[in-house]
């Protein structure tokens, strides 16, 4: 009898870890305008076809919630996607330890290696439409990828500070379904989204089309991760005039295009709706497909065309086999172009490191069109290495090796990727000033998306897929020194080894590959010195987990692999 009670007690103790979330199917009819909806982490939400949240609707999504897109909708729609229409709002507010994940129906988010990075186009994507300023004749347009007959697909207006809600700690994975040849959906599409909207700590991984595309509006974006997408990483058009800071992009070796394709106005020149694109983008790190990937469609790092302008500063571009910068320069008499934006001081690349075995001089970086008005791009090249203070040198990044991901046939992360620059090295020198920029920007002492900490660790797909060096700190927490797990991989138990530099209360949480809390350990107060904490893993599925150690000063994360 005692054994029976013990078994029942153990079963009750472990039940929360075996209970699977309920799946709730969401079709277009399930969301209407003027209503508020709350999606919670205890459920998985399955999008069935194009799901529109109409004007006046509000969608709140709890941290740790998983939303999936049905691969074959039961409707006549060609894909499954979530569309926040003009006048509606989404508040998808995750946390670093509990991100909100949008992914494919077939993705088991409890297993970090479930889908490979070459699994693209398995569902549609996330589309947010606003009433911001759009440089199209008439001041509005319908979003690409949706039927032109769909009135709810229109965006644009006259509200520069329009508020479509919040996207924070959101990861969009394996999207970009092909609706017809050469017509796909972006991972995240922002159409006419205004400056009142918050987009911060957002990831798009393995999208078949662009990672993030911004059509007009004044929305600003921060802490972006865009990797292994089939087309561009960050694309903007139709007069985007927002800002961006801390943008990390990687181009895959099997497929992918340039990280930045930047277009301008689509309205008639000189009309009331004509507005050039002119964002400020600071602290970008764009990693190319490598010298061995010369067949990949990646003609440059940045392309400016159709009167697209903007300012890049304090960035790092590396590991490309082709040109670095293309600026459209039409022959005389053929109209305005992006070279004219440069001549008006509306296109600049400042204080940026260019690093590639293929780049030995500015002539290797700047691409010149045969029929250009300035055939040699003489002035542009002079400004690049002169007034704009760009350099061709080693950025001294920790490691840009993707190891077993080179051929992208399966997830076998080697944990070597460390995009942080060496402290005090080249990336900490020769910085453009942040003076005069909007309060949106954080003045930092380094170039590129990362400084001494890796803010992408823990909550992103790249992290759960095993990309990052687990020794790369998530922040500059000095009160906890060296941390390690042994054994790792582990079966039913492992030991967390900590070097405590300042005593205080500790919290230790175990997160799954989607960043969801699966088990909490409460060691309480920890004294200074070396500590060993036993972690029980019984009842957990095999796969990749993250141990998050937190105190009042911050946190650190260590990757843990659970095996049989």
Image (cartoon, grey):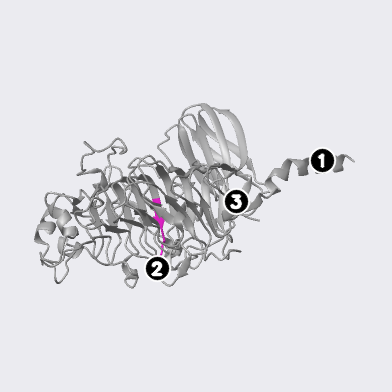
Name the residue at 79% across, 40% down: 9
Badge 3 marks a residue whose secondary structure is: helix
Query: Which x, y percent locates residue 362?
Result: 16, 60
Q: Is residue 245 visible?
A: yes
- Between marks 2 and 1, how big is the CA–CA gap? 55 Å
At horizontal 33% and vertical 48% (from top left) the residue drawn is 217
Q: Label 2, on which residue?
A: 255
Between disc 1 and disc 3, the foreground one is: 3
In the picture, measured across the screen, residue 561 lies left or right of residue 301, that is right
Left or right of 145 on screen, residue 243: left
Q: Which residue is mark 1?
A: 6
What segment is highlighted magenta in the picture?
225-230
The percent coordinates of residue 455 (x first, y second) are: 41, 44
The earlier-in-sequence mark between 1 and 3 is 1
- For residue 485, the mark is none
Q: Residue 229 magenta-drawn?
A: yes
Label 2 or label 3, whichever comes before in sequence order? 3
Q: Which mark is residue 30?
A: 3
Residue plotted at (12% across, 54% down): 343
Q: Residues within 10 Å of mark 3 (few under 14, many from 20)?
A: few
Q: Please count the marks in the image.
A: 3
> Above or below — where is 121 with respect to 277?
below
């Amino acid at each position: 009898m005692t054994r029976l009670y013990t078994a029942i007690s153990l079963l009750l103790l472990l039940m929360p870890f075996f209970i699977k979330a309920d799946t709730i199917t969401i079709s277009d009819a399930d969301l209407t305008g003027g209503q508020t909806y709350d999606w919670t982490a205890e459920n998985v939400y399955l999008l069935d076809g194009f799901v529109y949240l109409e004007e006046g609707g509000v969608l709140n999504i709890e941290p740790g919630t998983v939303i999936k897109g049905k691969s074959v909708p039961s409707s006549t729609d060609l894909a499954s996607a979530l569309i926040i229409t003009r006048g509606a709002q989404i508040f998808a507010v995750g946390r670093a330890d509990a991100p909100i994940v949008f992914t494919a129906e077939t993705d088991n988010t409890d297993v970090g290696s479930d889908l490979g990075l070459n699994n693209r186009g398995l569902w549609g994507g996330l589309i947010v439409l606003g009433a911001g300023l759009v440089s199209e004749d008439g001041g509005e347009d319908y979003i690409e990828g949706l039927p032109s007959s769909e009135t709810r697909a229109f965006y644009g207006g006259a509200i520069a500070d329009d508020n479509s809600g919040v996207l924070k700690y959101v990861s969009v994975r394996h999207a970009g379904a092909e609706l017809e040849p050469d017509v796909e959906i972006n991972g995240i599409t922002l159409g006419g989204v205004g400056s009142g909207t918050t987009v911060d700590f957002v990831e798009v991984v393995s999208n078949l089309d662009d990672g993030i595309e911004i059509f007009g509006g004044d929305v600003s974006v921060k802490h972006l991760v865009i990797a292994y997408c089939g087309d561009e990483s960050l694309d903007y058009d139709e007069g985007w005039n927002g800002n961006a800071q801390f943008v990390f992009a990687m181009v895959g070796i099997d497929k992918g295009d340039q990280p930045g394709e930047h277009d301008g106005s689509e309205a008639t020149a000189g009309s009331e709706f004509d507005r050039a694109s002119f964002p400020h983008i600071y602290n970008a790190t764009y990693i190319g497909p490598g010298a061995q990937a010369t067949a990949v469609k990646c003609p440059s790092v940045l392309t400016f065309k159709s009167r697209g302008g903007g300012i890049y500063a304090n960035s790092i571009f590396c590991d490309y086999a082709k040109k670095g910068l293309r600026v459209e320069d039409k022959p005389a008499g053929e109209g305005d172009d992006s070279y004219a934006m440069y001549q008006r001081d509306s296109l600049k690349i400042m204080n940026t490191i260019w690093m590639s075995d293929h780049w030995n001089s500015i002539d290797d970086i700047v691409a010149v069109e045969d029929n250009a008005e300035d055939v040699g791009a003489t002035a542009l090249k002079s400004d690049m290495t002169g007034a704009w203070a760009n350099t061709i040198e080693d950025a001294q990044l920790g490691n840009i090796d993707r190891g077993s991901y080179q051929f992208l046939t399966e997830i076998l992360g080697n944990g070597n990727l460390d995009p942080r620059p060496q402290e005090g090295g080249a990336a900490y020198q020769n910085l453009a000033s942040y003076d005069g920029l909007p309060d949106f920007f954080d003045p930092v002492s380094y170039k590129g998306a990362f400084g001494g900490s890796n803010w992408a660790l823990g909550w992103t797909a790249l992290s759960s897929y095993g990309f990052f060096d687990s020794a790369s700190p998530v922040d500059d927490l000095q009160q906890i020194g060296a941390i390690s797990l042994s054994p790792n991989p582990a079966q039913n138990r492992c030991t967390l080894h900590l070097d405590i530099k300042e005593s205080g209360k500790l919290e230790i949480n175990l997160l799954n590959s989607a960043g969801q809390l699966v088990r909490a350990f409460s060691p309480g107060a920890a004294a200074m010195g070396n500590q060993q904490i036993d972690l029980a893993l019984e009842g957990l599925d095999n796969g990749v987990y993250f141990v998050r150690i937190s105190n009042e000063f911050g946190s650190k994360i260590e990757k843990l692999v659970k095996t049989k």
